[in-house]
Image (tube, rainbow, N blue to C red):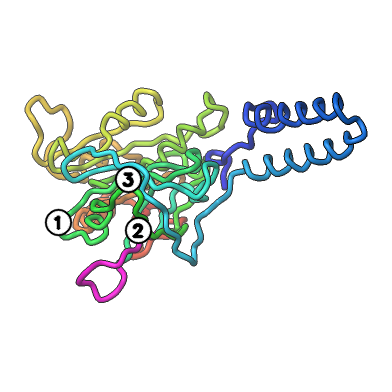
Amino acid sequence: MSAAHQIKPASALSAQYINGVYIPSTLLIVGVALTKKEWLPYAAAVAILLGAWRVYSSRSRKVLNPDVYQEFPLKEKTVLSHNVAIYRFGLPRPNDILGLPIGQHMSVAATIEGQPKEVVRSYTPISSDENPGYVDLLIKAYPTGNISKHVSNLKIGQTLKIKGPKGAMVYTPGMVRHFGMIAGGTGLTPMLQIIRAIIRGRPRNGGSDKTQVDLIFANVNFDDILLKSDLDALAKEDEGFRVHYVLNNPPEKWDGHVGFCTPEIIKAHLPAPAKDIKLLMCGPPPMISAMKKATDSLGYEKPRPVSKLQDQVFCF
């Protein structure tokens, strides 16, 4: 796992150790010294054992298993629109992390009435290992979407089956000079995961990541733009990240692009073909098919049917 998204161990002088180890141990030893000095060795041994257990139990633990589905309970649901919500699923312990490398995704499975076998779909969380204790999924419920409807109908406390990590993309700081991204709808999620990791790794935040990022985010209507305020805030915060919106049906006074994402829009905003750039694409299949043709016409390397990490044009 790269330094850009590791959970740093708690400092030896952090509040959790002061309140959970040092103060209780000191009180135990001082109390025994004042009452039964001959018991001091035993008190010291107990303090050491309790301290060791506290340190061990507070460590972050990766919970994802690539071979076995685990069930995680729904803790919160934040409704963003009539068919979009952020679903927060709890991990077993408060300090647990998924252990999901940046750029990878996970499988979600459910038994759906009327389906002959278990239905499986892939999702990329919008949270990361920087957020211990839970995982957030941004999901749009489609009328014909088996898993999305299943998740949207979950009640607090009900569980979702998850396993992973999976996927060919694993982001590491400095892997390219410039990312060009094209996303449609909930195809934003893997892009957002990588964008946030890059910004967390900037020199001003203690890292060394200077990767430039341009995101073209295409949607039908203005209300379909997911997490627009978050994206705009990231673009305002970080001069190395820019977002370009495209709408089929824009509102009045819209200053973004109108219509479909065209080769002209790609050429205007994304890095030109080069050995040290990469295009990332995620969205509905018809859109991705059109984007493959568009990027091919602009001189980018032809995408494979199944993308590999080394590809110049990578489709999630």
The residue lying furthest to the left in this view is 252
| Residue 122's disc number | 2
Q: Position of residue 78 (x, y in %)?
A: 28, 38
* Residue situated in front as seen by the camera: 105 or 215: 105
- Which of the 4 image quadrants contains residue 163? bottom left
- Which of the 4 image quadrants contains residue 252? top left
* Residue situated in front as seen by the camera: 198 or 128: 128
Q: Earlier in the sequence, mark 3 or mark 1?
A: 3
Q: Earlier in the sequence, mark 2 or mark 3?
A: 3
Q: Position of residue 138 (x, y in %)?
A: 31, 45
| Residue 182's disc number | none
User: Tag 1's secondary structure?
Assistant: loop
Instruction: Tell me if mark 2 has few (under 14), some (14-19) or many (20+) residues whose alpha carbon lies within 10 angstroms of its own.
Output: some
The residue lying furthest to the right in this view is 38
Q: Which residue is mark 3?
A: 87
Q: Position of residue 56 (x, y in %)?
A: 68, 44
Q: Amino acid at mark 1?
A: Pro
Q: Which residue is mark 1?
A: 143
Q: Earlier in the sequence, mark 1 or mark 2?
A: 2
Q: Amino acid at mark 3?
A: Tyr
Main SS class of the magenta portion in the image: loop
- Which of the 4 image quadrants contains residue 112? bottom left
User: Tag 2's secondary structure?
Assistant: strand
Q: Is residue 66 left or right of residue 59?
A: left
